Image (cartoon, rainbow, N blue to C red):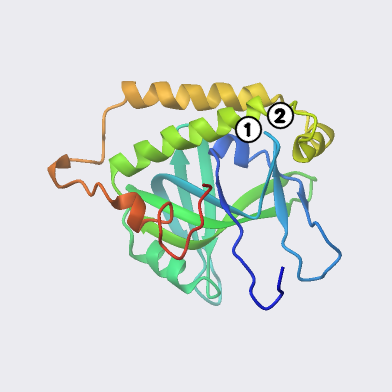
Amino acid sequence: MSQSAPTREVARRVFASEFNDAGYTFTESDDERAPVYALLPTGESSNRVFFVGTLTEKEDVGEDSEYWRGRIVDPTGTFFVYAGQYQPEAASKLRDLEPPAYVAVVGKPRTYETDDGTVRVSVRPESITEVDAATRDRWVAETARRTVERVAAFDDEGNEYARMARKEYDSDPETYKAAALSALEDLDDSGDELAGDESGSDDAALDDAPDGTDSAGTPEP
């Protein structure tokens, strides 16, 4: 591949329950500029992630300059995103949004080890887009499908990332399949607490959000 024409990494769809367990990171070359990947416990590498959830809290936790923290929940758990001066568009969006709000996020996984050795996983957002309930529901359905597919391929002989996950994690991939299926069931059972009048729902929201053709996102095919 020509080094003069780098391509963006695919943004993996992943639920919060799995993402928060993805504390192991690695590179695939010795180049100091090589991409850093998070290893998903279902056996996939992820340099970028794509998720949709409800922004429930935001806070400027910066001292000398703005540094926004957002808490975004999906049916399985919580993502934390952090955006400051090096992510101006995402930081501006967090500043302007009023929780609760549905948001689509594309960003890079980040890990941080606490003093007691616990590895925390968060997201450095490249883009944050406000979306509607229908967009969130479509993301849940598609992410559940992707999760189930990864679990189904976990024991494939040629699945190198699954071998890595088996070595690095104690978790059972079936746990994430169960969470995905539960999220699907929740779609049928839950009311829409944010949608209000859906007659004006934007059916093309996923095309405008990072899940579609927006330059901020390169979703899984």
Q: Where is 45 relative to 126, above or below?
A: above
Q: Nearer the viewer, residue 215 or 40?
A: 215
Amino acid type of the residue that numbered disc 2 sits on in the rendered structure: Phe
Please give the name of the residue rendered at 47% of the width and 49% of the height, measured from the top-left corner: 71
Q: Where is 68 relative to 138, above or below?
A: below
Please give the name of the residue rendered at 40% of the width and 48% of the height, measured from the top-left corner: 55
**Residue 90 x, y percent position in the rendering:** 45, 66
Residue 142: which quarter of the image?
top left
Please give the name of the residue rendered at 76% of the width and 46% of the height, measured from the top-left corner: 24
**Residue 112 x, y percent position in the rendering:** 71, 54
Disc ID at residue 154: 2
Q: Secondary structure at mark 2?
A: loop
**Residue 143 x, y percent position in the rendering:** 49, 37
**Neighbours of disc 1 within 10 Å: few (<14), some (14-19), many (20+):** many
Disc ID at residue 150: 1
Q: Secondary structure at mark 1?
A: helix
Q: Nearer the viewer, residue 66 or 52?
A: 52
Badges 1 and 2: C-beta atoms under 8 Å apart?
Answer: yes
**Residue 75 x, y percent position in the rendering:** 45, 32
Quarter of the picture containing the N terminus is: bottom right
